[in-house]
Image (cartoon, helix red, strand yellow):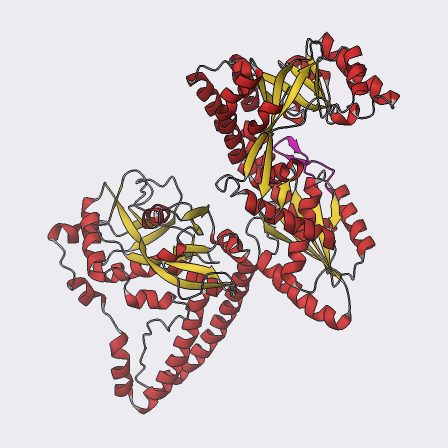
């Protein structure tokens, strides 16, 4: 029994007490008051026109098994006593009164079949298990409403679909609402989510402009969790219908259910009112005793029952409170509980002047575990990580699961910066031991960011945001480490976020262009290659350095769009380049992300093939990290590139994970010696020795060498003496645009 039902039960008993006392004065008056609430089963059954065959079927089938879901409040869900409740269950009770059918509830699962149940409730989008047929009339048809952040750009209570044009809107992944929204507002940007909490978090963080979903479910969710930052802003003409479905093996049951649902109707108000945000008292039946003696006896029994019900209500409230404030998987406190605790702690610390630490933890390699071992193993890893955290984090500190593979710790022991460093060092050390699951070992490292109250902020959301920024800085600078937030970090993070947002529009706003830097053959001084270099000029920020915006593009995923633009622009410039340089080879830099999402690479190969351009005119520059532990997908892409005659160059060689193993394993045509080695070869004997070694190694492996960053004649002369093949740098030529090609000698 849900909290609303238990409350209604107590109100029912209080009304019974009033009736018992009234019975001592006037039994007839009590009977008159009770009669309107009584609905005899016989009269209800007589009101439904059933055929003789349908009545016979009901007698022959005393029980009808019905599959009901357990996690869709308030439509259908499971109580702490494992019983099901919700609108669907109440609707089944109405059908039972109307037809005489008796329903036995079975827990729904995706592989439910006709051998297990005869009836299913809660069918959305008409997606049915095999062997079942929809009842013709939906028993629910719920409006989809628009929800916005209270502090957002859209005004709560005044939003319609037309105002969502060119807005980013969150919707539920599994359903037809997304399709209908796209049809109604073609230029709407949809972001799909599996659970409401994630969508609300994105809305609260202003990463989406609105969230559209089932009004009944989301109103209940917002009120239940007391979410203050989200408001309903309007409704849409799009509705979500909910059906029942019967087994194909029982056509008479199909006929009975069609009649029953048609008579009860869609969205019966007496059922929906029970589950509104402020539920009204449910139907109350009054029992009448005819003599005062039995009335007194009943009075004592009801008092006893009331105490028992009150105990059950308290237990139910505790259970519901725990479920609302704790993560289902790890049983740790969730983000709502932790935010409330942090708010309380801040209020107390204002008086006590104690410091509070906020630490956000992210599992470094959790995605790889999910991808390779499966999500079931990933869930077990999360549980074991949570258990390990709980075992080493002492009270009064609080550890919570913040979502996905992120955890958050409140350090409430008046910590300073040194104490936070020591605390996080213990956590990193504790995570060094592998997790043993199904006879396999899984190593999980963690990256952490922290903020301090009151040093960094006195606001709950800012403390969490600053800790999150510090955590991402830890991941960007090597992972498996801890970083404490500072103000400069926030400025950098804000600037990177701003640049990231602007970068998403750089292509459509025509802010990108290419420069080409010639690469010269040191044996004949001819320009045989050019490297295509992506440049970004922003009207406000000016020319943004590539080492800044490329890393941002890789973080936010826009590197794919930038890569596609580079491919298209290189093909557009190809004719001009060949006119100036003749039989030229164009070098194009590729990100590892482009290999993981390789559609643009395949499209480029298809484009040069359709234009009869030989692949030998192009060279893809890749980094060493791509080849260390390449997936089968990466290996296949490298093979396809080689098959089409496109050459491969290993960029920035010597700065990362240089290894002879992958040079021998993969067909590498060029190695580019990083400019950090070239800049000092005329003064530094060690750099000179390293260059000689790299060049000698390349010659032995039949790999040609390209020196980057050659800026003086002395550097070029030394490289030529060492038999380096190519020179690239300001000494010979700076990068130039396609318009400036005529200036190249």
Asked whether 607 falls inside the magenta stretch, the response is no
> Residue 213 location, x and y as percent?
40, 55
Residue 503 higher or lower than 348, as above or below: above
Relative to the observer, which residue lies in front, 234 or 216? 234
Question: For the view shown, which residue lies furthest in the left direction?
Answer: 52
Please state the extent of the stretch shown in magenta in the rendering.
Answer: 431-447
Asked whether 436 falls inside the magenta stretch, the response is yes
> Residue 208 location, x and y as percent?
49, 52
Relative to the observer, which residue lies in front, 344 or 609? 609
Image quarter in which the C terminus is found: top right
Tell me the quarter of the picture where residue 530 sits: top right
- Residue 289 showing in the rendered view: yes
In the rendered structure, the answer to whether residue 224 lies left or right of residue 250 reads: right
Residue 574 higher or lower than 495, as above or below: above
> Residue 472 location, x and y as percent?
66, 45
Residue occupying image coordinates x 59% and y 28%: 740
In the rendered structure, the answer to whether residue 100 lies left or right of residue 490 reads: left
Relative to the observer, which residue lies in front, 25 or 447? 447
> Residue 335 location, x and y as percent?
59, 56
- Residue 74 showing in the rendered view: no
Residue 625 higher or lower than 367, as above or below: above
Residue occupying image coordinates x 51% and y 51%: 198
Residue 599 higher or lower than 352, as above or below: above
Q: How many marks do you count on the picture? A: 0
Image quarter in which the N terminus is found: bottom left
In the rendered structure, the answer to whether residue 6 lies left or right of residue 116 reads: right
């Amino acid at each position: 029994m849900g909290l609303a039902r238990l409350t209604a039960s107590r109100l029912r008993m209080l009304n019974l007490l009033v009736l018992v006392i009234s019975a001592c004065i006037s039994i007839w008056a009590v009977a008159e008051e009770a009669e309107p609430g009584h609905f005899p089963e016989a009269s209800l059954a007589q009101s439904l026109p059933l055929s003789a065959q349908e009545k016979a079927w009901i007698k022959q089938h005393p029980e009808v098994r019905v599959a009901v879901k357990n996690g869709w409040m308030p439509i259908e869900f499971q109580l702490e006593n494992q019983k099901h409740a919700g609108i669907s269950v109440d609707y089944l009770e109405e059908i039972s009164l109307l037809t005489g059918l008796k329903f036995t509830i079975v827990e729904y699962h995706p592989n439910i079949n006709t051998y297990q149940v005869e009836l299913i409730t809660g069918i959305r989008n008409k997606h049915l298990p095999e062997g079942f047929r929809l009842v013709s009339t939906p028993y629910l048809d719920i409006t989809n409403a628009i929800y916005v952040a209270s502090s957002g750009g859209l005004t709560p209570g005044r939003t319609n679909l037309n105002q969502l044009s060119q807005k980013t809107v969150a919707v539920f992944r599994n359903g037809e609402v997304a399709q209908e929204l796209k049809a109604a507002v073609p230029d709407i940007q949809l972001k799909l989510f599996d659970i409401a909490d994630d969508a609300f978090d994105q809305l609260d963080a202003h990463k989406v402009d609105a969230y559209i979903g089932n009004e009944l479910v989301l109103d209940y969710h917002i009120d239940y969790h007391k979410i203050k930052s989200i408001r309903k802003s309007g409704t849409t003409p799009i509705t979500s219908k909910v059906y029942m479905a019967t087994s194909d093996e029982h056509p008479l049951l199909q006929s009975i259910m069609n009649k029953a649902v048609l008579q009860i109707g869609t969205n019966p108000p007496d059922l929906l009112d029970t589950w509104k945000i402020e539920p009204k008292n449910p139907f109350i039946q009054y029992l009448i005793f005819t003599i005062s003696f039995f009335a007194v006896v009943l009075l004592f029994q009801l008092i006893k029952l009331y105490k028992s019900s009150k105990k059950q209500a308290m237990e139910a409230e505790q259970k519901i409170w725990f479920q609302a404030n704790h993560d289902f998987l790890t049983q740790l406190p969730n983000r709502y509980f932790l935010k409330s605790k942090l708010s309380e702690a801040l209020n107390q610390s204002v008086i006590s002047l104690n410091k509070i630490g906020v630490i956000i933890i992210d599992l470094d390699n959790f995605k790889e575990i999910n991808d390779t071992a499966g999500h079931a193993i990933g869930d077990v890893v999360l549980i074991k990580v949570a258990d390990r955290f709980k075992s080493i984090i002492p009270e009064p500190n609080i550890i919570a699961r913040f979502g996905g593979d992120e955890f958050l710790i409140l350090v409430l022991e008046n910590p300073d910066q040194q104490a936070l460093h020591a605390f996080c060092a213990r956590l990193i050390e504790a995570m060094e031991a592998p997790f043993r699951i199904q006879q396999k070992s899984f190593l999980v490292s963690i990256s952490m960011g922290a903020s301090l109250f009151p040093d960094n902020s006195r606001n709950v959301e800012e403390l969490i945001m600053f800790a999150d920024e510090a955590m991402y800085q830890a991941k960007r600078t090597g992972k498996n480490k801890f970083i404490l937030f500072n103000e400069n970090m926030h400025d950098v993070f804000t600037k990177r976020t701003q640049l990231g947002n602007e970068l998403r529009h750089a292509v459509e706003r025509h802010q990108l262009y290419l420069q080409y830097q010639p690469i010269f053959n040191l044996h004949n001084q001819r320009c045989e290659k050019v490297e295509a270099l992506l440049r970004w000029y922003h009207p406000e920020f000016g020319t943004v350095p590539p080492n800044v915006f490329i890393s941002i593009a890789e973080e936010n995923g826009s590197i794919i769009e930038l890569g596609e633009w580079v491919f298209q622009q290189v093909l557009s410039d190809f004719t001009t380049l060949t006119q100036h340089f003749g039989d030229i080879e164009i070098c194009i830099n590729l990100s590892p992300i482009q290999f993981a999402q390789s559609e643009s690479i395949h499209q480029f190969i298809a484009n040069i093939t359709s234009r009869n351009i030989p692949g030998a005119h192009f060279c893809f520059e890749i980094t060493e990290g791509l080849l260390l532990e390449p997936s089968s997908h990466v290996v296949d892409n490298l093979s396809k590139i080689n098959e089409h005659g496109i050459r491969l160059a290993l960029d920035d060689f010597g700065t990362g994970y240089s290894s002879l193993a992958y040079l021998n394993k993969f067909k590498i045509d060029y190695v580019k010696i990083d400019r950090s080695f070239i800049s000092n070869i005329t003064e530094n004997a060690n750099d000179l020795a390293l260059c000689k070694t790299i060049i000698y190694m390349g010659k032995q492996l039949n790999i040609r060498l390209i020196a980057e960053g050659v800026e003086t004649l002395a550097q070029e002369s030394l490289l030529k003496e060492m038999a380096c093949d190519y020179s690239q740098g300001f000494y010979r030529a700076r990068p130039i645009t396609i318009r400036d090609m005529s200036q190249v000698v």
